[in-house]
Image: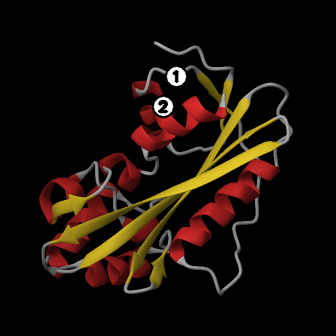
Amino acid sequence: MPVQFPPIILASKSPRRQELLTLMGLNFKVELKDVDESYPGDLSPAEIAVYIAEKKAKAFTADGEIVITADTIVALNGEILGKPADRKHAQEMLTKLSGSKHEVFTGVTLAREGQIHSFYDRTIVYCRAVTAAEIDFYIDHYKPFDKAGSYGVQDWWGIVVVERIEGSYTNVMGLPTEKLYNELLKFI
């Protein structure tokens, strides 16, 4: 690693975020806090992602460590598609995404000793049209209930349905790694 970073706490249970930090070569530990993820109704998708990431960061009182928090929002024509409540909700969301383009925003907050720095990244994702049978197959085999927008770009949906993206691939996974690395360099 060309740069020695202070100890890092990743405040996320997302296995994808953990995998991405590992692939970045960063040493970190995972710590979780329960945080209310509600937000004011007048925020844009980018503002929502940053607002929630900052709420998560403010739950920590780190001592010398850098706390990294993140929140990913999927937006389709201004509608926020969060994590599905159940199978029917996942079917509804994936049907909306079929044959359309949508935006993925990830807000990230870095916090250390009272300093807070937040940023976001935006990626446009284009999906081909899919059938109800394909949506049912996806839900049955990949159980996307813990994912914003009801899909993972790193699994079957991303391999078979996503036609192209404009922007960061890792942002769609839940953490814009290239931007995060540059922001960490500035933050230390």
For image coordinates 37% across by 55% down, the residue present is 172
Q: Is residue 47 above or below residue 41?
A: above
The numbered mark, 2 or 1, whose residue comes first in the sequence reads 2
For image coordinates 68% across by 20% down, the residue present is 6
Q: Is residue 18 visible?
A: no
User: Could you tell me if the residues under marks 2 and 1 are in contact, i.e. CB atoms within 8 Å?
Assistant: yes
Q: Is residue 25 above or below residue 100?
A: above
Amino acid, disc 1: Leu
Left or right, 102 with respect to 27, comes to left
Residue tagged 2: 21
Residue tagged 1: 26
Calculate the distance from the C-alpha at mark 2 to the C-alpha at mark 1. Answer: 6 Å
Q: Is residue 15 visible?
A: yes
Amino acid, disc 2: Leu
Q: Identify the secondary structure beneath mark 2.
A: helix
Q: Which mark is residue 59?
A: none
User: Would you call the spot at circle 2 few (<14 residues within 10 Å), some (14-19), or many (20 or more)?
Assistant: some
Q: Identify the secondary structure beneath mark 1.
A: loop
Left or right, 52 with respect to 71, comes to right
Q: Position of residue 64 (x, y in %)?
A: 80, 25
User: Would you call the spot at circle 1 few (<14 residues within 10 Å), some (14-19), or many (20 or more)?
Assistant: some
Q: Position of residue 146 (x, y in %)?
A: 48, 59
Camera-side residue of 177 and 130: 177
Q: Position of residue 1 (x, y in %)?
A: 46, 12
For image coordinates 85% across by 41% down, the residue present is 114
Q: Position of residue 188 (x, y in %)?
A: 66, 28
User: Can you name the residue that lies furthest to the front here?
Assistant: 186
